[in-house]
Image (tube, rainbow, N blue to C red):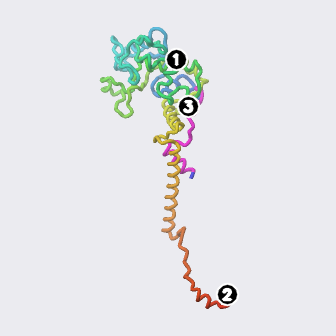
Amino acid sequence: MMKTFSALCAMLAGSCVLAEPQCKTFAEIYGGGKALCENMWDEAFVYTEEGPAYTMWFYGENPNVNVTKAIHASGTKQLYGYDEHNGHEYCLNYSHKSAPSEEPDMTECNAWQHDSCCYASVVKSGQALNEAYGKAHHWDRCGKLSSGCERFFVAEACMYECEPAAALFAKFPSHPEAEKDPNYFHGTDGANAWQIKGMPIEASFCDAWYQACKNDLFCSSDNGNYFTCGKEYEATDGLNNNNGDDGLPVPWLIVVIVVTIVAVMGLTYLGYLIIMEKKGKPVYYAVPRMPPTDPASEMASSPSEAHQRGY
């Protein structure tokens, strides 16, 4: 019965255990800056020790501008949406602007105020950045991060929201010419305009991030994959908020599970009875009925007994 219950739980509710993904230290999950940058964000970033690479934070003039120029000049990657004279033509497509422009009222991500793909209202604080994509994607689900560690998450979020060069590494670029390039991903299944693929990031930045966070806790699912963790948190949050995957409140979901278990057990037993009947070994059989007894005959056959009873 427990196996049936577990199977139904998995089928109807995804899981009957409301445990969240396991938390481990950054040191246990990643072991270094390379795994952190490349595993956490799926395939968005590439840990780069040699050659032009971007940074996720800076002061003063944006050094990423020259990085883009160097990559463009090298010819190692076709940068659709970039012109060496006019700069960047468009941004990623989520909460971004359609094209980069000045954003003078920037506070949290003020490094990008002179040329930005984000709106100041979207990136107004570290808390706003952490909460931008819902509770399942909060970076502190395993507990409050140290201040030094959290600053790197803020830097990455600012870079993703505000950096014009990020659009040059869109996994599914919206630039018309990209559709003709076989080196880009195409199609509608799973395609999106927000995802980055293969953006080179300075190894020194990734290493510094790891050192700042190595003793902090983070979701360890799928080698610390931020997106996998988000999906798992969405599932557990849904159950913890009394909502099953099908929208039923958990009490009703339990009723459905119990009724289904009873029905399955009943059908299984009925099948067993039918099989045994066909084998000539019925589990239940009719008890032969005795012929009715005639009281007069009984008295006649036992006069002494009838006398004793007062007849």
Whether residue 182 is visible here, answered yes or no, is yes
Q: Which residue is mark 3?
A: 220
Look at the numbered discs 1 and 3 and tell me whether their residues touch, using CB distance below 8 Å. no
Which is more N-terminal, label 3 or label 2? Answer: 3
Residue 110: % across, % down: 47, 12
Which residue is painted at 52% across and 56% down in the image? 265
Q: Which residue is mark 1?
A: 205
Which is more N-terminal, label 1 or label 2? Answer: 1
> Which type of secondary structure does the marked residue at label 3 adopt?
loop
Q: Nearer the viewer, residue 216 or 286?
A: 286
Whether residue 49 is visible here, answered yes or no, is no
Residue 294: % across, % down: 57, 86
Residue type, mark 3 in image: Ser
Look at the numbered discs 2 and 3 and tell me whether their residues touch, using CB distance below 8 Å. no
Q: Which residues are magenta?
A: 2-27
Which quadrant would the C terminus be assigned to in this image?
Answer: bottom right
Q: Is residue 22 magenta?
A: yes
